[in-house]
Image (cartoon, coloured by chain):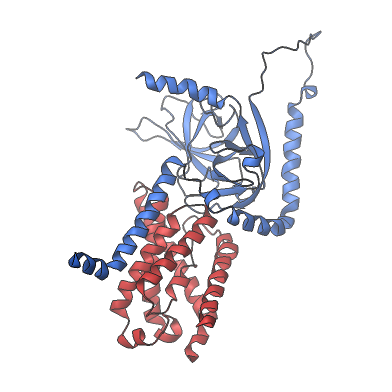
């Protein structure tokens, strides 16, 4: 017993170090793997409030760019309105049917804090659980995909940006629906890599990459980027494709969080598959 | 004693603001991500009890983690660095440093001593931080490059900071 106390006394610094280090590695591991530790709630969103205060001041310097991006987005959306199309048919019968059921809604949010040069980048926005945002929802900007919600507090959320080693977004070619997975290699915030595209797919420069219909996070066909360069090693089955991202992360100010009403239903059906085998 | 404590708290707040508002917005390349807030742990008095240094490191990391939304990452790195600091000082600092409450700074210990001290501990901190951030050894050499370039840049900023703000301690 006395030896034990002596041991504890002699090595208390190391034991304290060991305990604290274990503690931090465990919460790091938990967070990396399951995203269950809701860290934002733990810190009470103090950091987010700090960033919002800073952002309220600095936002005035970029009002022009914000306006420009909103204008171009408005123009693009106006082009998609029904009255922008020439009606080719002779007559239309309007039936109030149940074929079209709304699947997605969008929650607009402002970027409060953003980083682009770390290996794992995160974005903080000023909307949270009070606005119906939950973890694992997709986020898009006015030009394309931005990231995935990781943790939510009452009025703030953090997004795991597409510029993050843990973010993998299911994508496809717009022209032939060939699938790939978008992963960032930590090199340049303007580019990302599209992996697991099979070698029989025909790839050319400037091919458009959009989100695929496999994901429950994003609607199908949200723009991601364009093929910048591609090569294939002789003994490799998959392409190395460098994608120029549509979203300019360094000037990102307005984003939309995607609420998918049918996500639970899809996941439930897919879960029954898993219990099958 | 109270004044000393208040100086340390003021320095802590100042360093965090400097890191978050200035250094984080440099955004040079993805290979240079300096972290200068560790100057706070570096500049603690030599004769401070190791367990107090560990607790301070723990809280420094916790505060930084809440701002970076990376639970455990900065915490682990600062604790690792705080523990190594005790080891390093036992070897590199002499007896008089432990008897008087001198803090490891350029003014008190000279530029070469401080450079080696800051570089060793900054490398230790960045090594932990960047490898646990990537969470894999797939990009081993790229991560190593990021660590060395960021550490060199951090030390450069730390030395500039020391020369600008910490000169007064020599009068003590």
As drawn, the residue found furthest toward the front would be A1
* Residue at 41%, 50% in the rendered image: A27
Taking depth in this image into account, of A83 and B129 the one nearest to the observer is B129
Question: Residue A166 falls in which quadrant of the image?
Answer: top left
Tell me where residue B99 appears, x and y as whole percent.
Answer: 35, 87
A216 up-or-down from B1: above or below: above
Query: Number of labelled discs?
Result: 0
Taking depth in this image into account, of A65 and B91 the one nearest to the observer is B91
Tell me, yes or no, if residue B158 can be seen here. yes
Colour seen for chain B = red
A106 up-or-down from A116: above or below: above
* Residue at 81%, 8% in the rendered image: A91
Taking depth in this image into account, of A87 and A229 the one nearest to the observer is A87
Question: Residue A9 falls in which quadrant of the image?
Answer: bottom left
* Residue at 77%, 30% in the rendered image: A78
Taking depth in this image into account, of B146 and B41 the one nearest to the observer is B41
* Residue at 32%, 60% in the rendered image: A18
As drawn, the residue found furthest toward the bottom would be B171
Tell me where residue A140 appears, x and y as whole percent.
Answer: 62, 38
Tell me where residue B54 appears, x and y as whole percent.
Answer: 39, 67
Tell me where residue B98 appears, x and y as whole percent.
Answer: 34, 84
Q: Which chain is blue?
A: A
B21 up-or-down from A228: above or below: below
Tell me, yes or no, if residue A142 can be seen here. no
């Amino acid at each position: 017993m006395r030896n034990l106390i002596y041991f504890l006394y002699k090595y208390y610094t190391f034991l304290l170090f060991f305990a604290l280090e274990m503690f931090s590695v465990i919460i790091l591991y938990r967070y990396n793997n399951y995203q269950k530790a809701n860290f934002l709630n733990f810190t009470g969103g103090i950091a987010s409030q700090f960033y919002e205060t800073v952002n309220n001041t600095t936002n005035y310097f970029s009002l022009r760019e914000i306006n420009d991006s909103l204008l171009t987005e408005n123009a693009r959306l106006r082009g998609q309105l029904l009255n922008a199309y020439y009606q080719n048919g002779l007559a239309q019968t309007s039936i109030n049917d149940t074929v079209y059921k709304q699947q997605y809604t969008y929650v607009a949010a402002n970027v409060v804090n953003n980083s682009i040069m770390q290996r794992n980048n995160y974005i903080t926005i000023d909307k949270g659980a009070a606005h119906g945002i939950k973890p694992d929802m997709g986020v898009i900007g006015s030009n394309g995909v931005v990231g995935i919600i990781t943790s939510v507090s009452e009025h703030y959320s953090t997004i795991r940006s597409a510029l993050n080693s843990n973010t993998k977004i299911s994508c496809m070619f717009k022209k032939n629906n060939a699938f790939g997975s978008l992963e960032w290699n930590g090199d340049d915030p303007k580019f990302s890599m599209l992996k697991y595209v099979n070698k029989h797919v025909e790839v050319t420069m400037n091919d458009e990459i959009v989100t695929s219909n496999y994901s429950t996070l994003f609607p199908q066909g949200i723009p991601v980027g364009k093929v910048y360069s591609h090569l294939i090693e002789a003994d490799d089955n998959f392409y190395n494709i460098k994608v120029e991202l549509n979203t300019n992360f360094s000037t990102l100010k307005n984003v939309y969080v995607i609420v998918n009403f049918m996500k639970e239903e899809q996941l439930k059906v897919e879960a029954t598959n898993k219990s099958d085998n | 004693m109270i004044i000393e404590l208040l100086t340390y708290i003021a320095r802590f707040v100042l360093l965090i603001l400097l890191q978050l508002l200035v250094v984080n917005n440099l955004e040079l390349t993805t290979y240079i991500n300096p972290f200068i807030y560790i100057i706070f742990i570096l500049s603690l008095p030599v004769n401070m009890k190791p367990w107090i240094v560990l607790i301070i490191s723990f809280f420094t990391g916790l505060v930084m983690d809440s701002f970076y939304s990376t639970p455990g990452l900065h915490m682990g790195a600062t604790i690792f660095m705080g523990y190594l600091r005790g080891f390093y000082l036992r070897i590199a600092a002499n007896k008089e440093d432990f008897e008087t409450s001198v803090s490891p700074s350029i003014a008190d210990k000279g530029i070469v001593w401080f450079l080696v001290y800051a570089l060793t501990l900054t490398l230790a901190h960045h090594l932990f931080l960047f490898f646990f951030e990537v969470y894999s050894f797939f990009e081993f050499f790229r991560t190593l490059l990021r660590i060395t370039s960021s550490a060199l840049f951090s030390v450069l900023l730390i030395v500039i900071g020391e020369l600008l703000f910490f000169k007064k301690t020599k009068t003590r």
